[in-house]
Image (cartoon, helix red, strand yellow):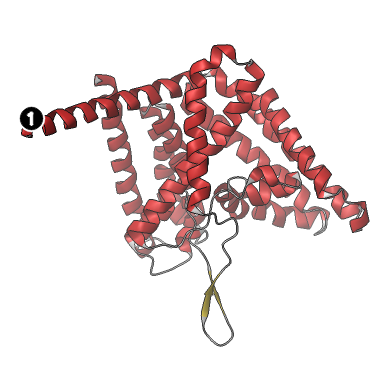
Amino acid sequence: MVMELGEMGSFIKVWLTVFLSLCYCYALPKFVPKGIPRLLCILPIVCLFLDLPLHLTSVHLGGTTGFFIAWLANFKLLLFAFGKGPLSSDNSISLARFIAVACLPIKIQQVQKHQNGSSKEKPKKGQKSPVNYATKGLLLGLLLRVYDYSEHIHPKLLWVMYCFHIYFMLEIILVVVATVARAVMGLELEPQFDEPYLASSLQDFWGRRWNIMVTSILRPSVYEPVLMAATRLVGRKWAPLPAVMGTFVVSAIMHELIFYYLGRMSPTWQVTWFFLLHGVCLVVEIAIKKAVSSRRFQLPRVISGPLTVVFVMATVFWLFLPALLRCKADVRAFEEYAAVGTFVKNVGRVFMSKRVFIA
C-alpha cells in the first residue's frame, strides 16, 4: 500500500509540473516571436517532458503519461514554436483549453464555414455510440476474467487476447479522457479510433483508422516537412513515399521510448523493425497504386480486408508483442488490476461497515 501511495504522489507531482510548464509555454507568445527564439525557450520543457515519465514505475500511469507528454505534448509544443499545430489554431485560445489540448490526446472538432456565413461541424468520422464503448468495456472485463485460466489456454491464443486487450484498453482510456475534456470544457472532440479491424489496406489502417490522434500530429510535424523536401528532389508524384517512410521512422523511435518507460530495459529494436517493415510495405502499396491507377487492378475489399488484418496481427506476434512481454508489461498490468480491485473492495467494506454502525 505504501508503494501505491508513493506512486500516486509521484503521479501528482509529475502532472503538477506538466501544468506549470504549460502555463509557461502559454505565456511565451506575448514575449517571444515564433520561430527559433520561441523554439529555444520551449526546448527545456521538451527535455523535461522526456524526463518526467521516468519518475513513474506503473505500467498504466507511467505508460499513459509517457504517451501523453513525452510524445504528443512535445510534438504539439514543437509545432507551437513555429506557430503551427493545434495550439496555434486560435489566437484567443484560453489557458485551460491550451493545457487540455497540449497534454491530452484530444483533437477539437473542426467547424466548416458556408458561403452564407453559417457554420457547420465537420462530419464526425468514426463517431461511435455509448453502446459501442460499453460493449468494449464489457469485453475487456471478460478478458481480465479469462486470464485467471491462462494456464489452460494456448500461448498463441493468449497473444490474440493480448492484442484485443491492448486495443480495447487504449480506446477506452482515450475516450474517457476525451469525455472528461468534453464535460469540463464543452469541447466537441474527434474520435481516436475508427474500427481498425475493418481496414481495407495498410494505408486505410494507419492513415484513417488506428490512433487517429497520433496520425494528426505526425502529419504536420514529420510527414509534411519531409514531403516538401522530397518534392524538390523526386517530384510531387513520388514525394509521399519518403514522407511516409520518414513518418514511420519517427513513430518507431517514439515507440521505443515508450517501451523504455515501461520496462527501463535496453531496446532490442524489435519495435523499430515492426514499424520499418510496415513503413516499407505501405510505401510499396502506395507506389503500386500510383503506378497502376486503374480501379480494375484493385483487390476486392472482401479479400484486401482480411489480408490486412492477418498481416498486422502476424507482425504484431512476430515483432511487437515479444518486446512488450519482455518488460513484463502483462504481469505488472495484472498486478495493478489486482491492487485496484483490492483497494475498491477495502473501500467498499469500510463504507458498508460505517452504514451498519450508523444504522
Q: Is residue 317 above or below residue 280?
A: above
Q: Is residue 155 above or below residue 246?
A: above
Quadrant showing the N terminus: top left
Q: Nearer the viewer, residue 236 or 344?
A: 344
Q: Determine if residue 83 is in view.
A: yes
- Indicate left or right for 351 with 149 as reference: left
Residue at image point 47% right, 32% down: 141
Residue at image point 60% right, 30% down: 163
| Quarter assignment of residue 66 | top left
Q: How many marks?
A: 1
- Indicate left or right for 34 with 201 as reference: left
**Badge 1, how many Cα within 10 Å: few under 14, some, many 20+?**
few
Residue at image point 78% right, 48% down: 241
Q: Residue furthest front?
A: 359
Q: Nearer the viewer, residue 246 or 135?
A: 135
- Indicate left or right for 56 with 152 as reference: left
